[in-house]
């Protein structure tokens, strides 16, 4: 069976799985103090150009967003995010359940506009009723966004400047970061993200791992962060499970290879859609492509091909997401080509 429903439908990249098998019977300390996790941390520090960064591993994106935001926000603070942001729409209120009230901004192809951010923060801080309101404490962005779009270096630098000027923490959700880093024409890399952000995570679940996300605090993590992770039920006794996988992902450029593969197959998929007269909702340079299907075509296709429902822009059309990944083969693309005929 082929699928374009998401980028985590299969298990782990063979090189990640092989490393798990190779190390399976080697006894190691728990809770992330094993040698594999220590090596993974050091490789991530080098990749980020941040020798002093603190790196922690959690198992999934929603868990990571909720725990990190709760750790960097004070009880009276909230987090600013695009109205289409993952934490605002698709995490069932998990960050807010841990106290991170979300302050939504309009979205522009999935991104927040720096000047709208500046205006919102200024208006909130000038409000005479602020003591009765949620203070802005952090800004959440994702790269790529929910629409597969990317921030530019200039946009990130401006957002970071606004955050620094107003004592806000900047947090970047990197669930699909591999695909953003390897997109054609991007001027954003890991060292830039580490320089500008107070916290971010490098996604593993959607980028070749069985599970796992690497949380990076380029300068200082919140005090007693391991204790904080455990208090929220997110500390793995077998921390090696994530450590081994990220050690493999950051060996010999595998993480970037996975990102490149996803991007290249997505661009080929876009060509197939165009050949069959299927327009894209917007131009996206990453592994997610959003197609506009006429309703009869959508109803016929979804019975044969798993894909992600996104929205109904009008009664006659449906926007669907096609996601590619390390396991998207030529056969996947050929079958899609056949089904669209």
Image: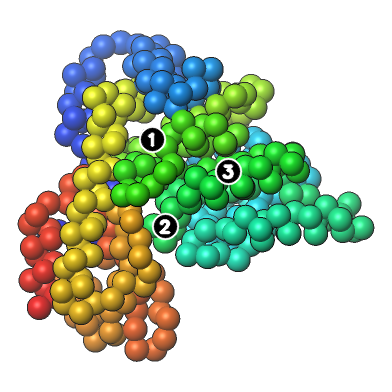
Residue 87: x %, y % from top left: 54, 53
Give the quarter of the figure containing the C terminus.
bottom left
Q: Nearer the viewer, residue 324 or 52?
A: 52
Give the quarter of the image for residue 70. Answer: top right
Q: Residue at x 46, y 23 (%)?
A: 49
The percent coordinates of residue 303 (x first, y second) are 19, 74
Total tally of numbered discs in the picture: 3
Q: Which mark is residue 212?
A: 1
Q: What's the mark number on residue 149?
A: 2
Q: Residue at x 63, y 62 (%)?
A: 105
Mark 3 nearby-residue class (10 Å; few <14, some 14–19, many ≥20): some
SS at badge 3: helix
Residue labelled with disc 3: 157
Position of 4 with respect to 152 (left or right) is left
Q: Earlier in the sequence, mark 3 or mark 1?
A: 3
- Structural crowding at the residue carrying mark 1, measured as other residues with C-alpha within 10 Å and reported as few (<14), some (14–19) or many (≥20): many
Coloring basis for residues: rainbow
């Amino acid at each position: 069976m082929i699928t374009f429903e998401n980028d985590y439908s299969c298990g782990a990249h063979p090189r990640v799985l092989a490393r798990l098998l190779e190390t399976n019977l080697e006894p190691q300390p728990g809770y992330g103090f094993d040698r594999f996790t220590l090596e993974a941390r050091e490789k991530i520090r080098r990749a980020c150009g941040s020798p002093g960064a603190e790196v922690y591993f959690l198992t999934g994106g929603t868990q990571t967003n909720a725990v990190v935001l709760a750790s960097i926000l004070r009880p009276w603070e909230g987090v600013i995010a695009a109205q289409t942001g993952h934490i605002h729409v698709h995490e069932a209120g998990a960050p807010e359940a841990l106290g991170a009230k979300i302050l939504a901004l309009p979205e522009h192809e999935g991104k927040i506009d720096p000047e709208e951010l500046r205006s919102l923060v200024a208006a909130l801080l000038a409000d005479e009723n602020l003591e009765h309101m949620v203070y802005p404490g952090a800004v959440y962005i994702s790269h790529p966004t929910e629409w597969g779009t990317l921030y530019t270096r200039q946009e990130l630098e401006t957002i970071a400047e606004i955050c620094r000027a107003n004592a806000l923490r900047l947090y970047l959700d990197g669930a699909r970061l591999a695909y953003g880093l390897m997109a054609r024409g991007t001027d954003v890399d890991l060292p830039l993200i580490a320089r500008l952000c107070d916290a971010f995570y490098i996604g593993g679940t959607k980028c070749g791992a069985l599970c796992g996300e690497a949380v990076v605090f380029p300068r200082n993590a919140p005090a007693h962060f391991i204790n904080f992770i455990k208090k929220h039920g997110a500390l793995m006794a077998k921390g090696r499970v994530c450590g081994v996988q990220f050690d493999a992902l950051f060996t010999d450029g595998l993480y970037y290879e996975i990102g490149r593969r996803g991007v290249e197959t997505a661009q080929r998929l876009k060509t197939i859609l165009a050949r069959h007269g299927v327009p894209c909702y917007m131009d996206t340079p990453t592994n997610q492509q959003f197609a506009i299907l006429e309703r009869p075509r959508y109803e016929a296709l979804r019975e044969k091909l798993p894909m992600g429902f996104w929205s109904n822009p009008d009664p006659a059309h449906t926007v669907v997401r096609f996601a590619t990944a390390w396991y998207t083969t030529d056969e996947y693309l050929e079958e899609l080509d056949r089904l669209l005929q």
